[in-house]
Image (cartoon, helix red, strand yellow):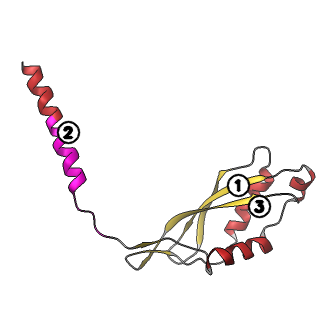
Amino acid sequence: MKNKIILVTILLLFVIYGHAQDTIPVADTNKVLPEFRGGDVAYNKYSVKQVKYPQEAKEKAHQGTVIVAFTVEADGSITHVHAVKEVEGAPELTVEAIRFISAMPLWQPGTINGKPTSMESAKGLHFRLQ
C-alpha cells in the first residue's frame, strides 16, 4: 500500500510538473535570422565568382556537397567555421568550402527583439563537374 502511494505521488508530481512546464509563459521574441547582405540571390552570385573547384578534385572527378556551419557574430563577421558534412575521400572540397565561408564579407547579423545577436548558420556548397 505504501509503495502504491509513493508511486501515485511520483506520477502526480510528473503530471503537475509537466503541465507547469507547458503553461509557463515564454517571452515573446522577434527573432530575425542572419543573412548574406543582399539575400540568397547575392549569395549565389558571390559564390559562383569566389568558389574555386580544387584541381585535385577535378582530376579525381570528386563531386558532392559540403555543409559548413558557422557563427554570424553580432557585428556580421563570420567565426567558428567548420564542416558538418563532407564528401568522403575528397578533403580538398572541405578545405575549399571552409576557405570560402571564412573569407565571406560581413553578413547582416541576426537579431532578437531588434538587437544584433550572434547566431549559428550553415550553408551547403555543391561541387559538380560539368
Residue in view at x 59 percent, y 66 percent: 79
Q: Kindly give the residue lying farthest to the left in the view shown.
A: 1
Q: Quadrant of residue 65?
A: bottom right
How far separated are the C-alphas under marks 3 and 1?
Answer: 9 Å
Q: Is residue 54 left or right of residue 15?
A: right
How far separated are the C-alphas under marks 3 and 2?
Answer: 50 Å
Comparing labels 3 and 2, the label whose residue is closer to the camera: 2
> Badge 3, how many Cα within 10 Å: few under 14, some, many 20+?
some
Residue type at mark 1? Val
Local secondary structure at mark 3? helix
Residue identifier under label 3: 96
Residue identifier under label 2: 14
User: Could you say which disc has been placed on residue 66 in the image?
Assistant: 1
How far separated are the C-alphas under marks 2 and 1?
Answer: 43 Å
Q: Quadrant of residue 100?
A: bottom right
Majority secondary structure of magenta residues: helix
Q: Is residue 97 left or right of residue 113?
A: right
Residue in view at x 71 percent, y 61 percent: 125
> Badge 1, how many Cα within 10 Å: few under 14, some, many 20+?
many
Verify CB contact (< 8 Å) between mark 3 and mark 1.
yes
Residue type at mark 3? Glu
Mark 3 and mark 1 lie on one chain; the one further toward the N terminus is 1
Q: Kindly give the residue lying farthest to the right in the view shown.
A: 59
Q: Is residue 27 left or right of residue 104?
A: left
Q: Is residue 86 magenta?
A: no
Residue type at mark 2? Phe
Instruction: Look at the image and give the residue range highlighted in magenta.
Output: 12-28
Residue in view at x 82 percent, y 66 percent: 52
Comparing labels 3 and 1, the label whose residue is closer to the camera: 1
Q: Is residue 29 left or right of residue 46?
A: left
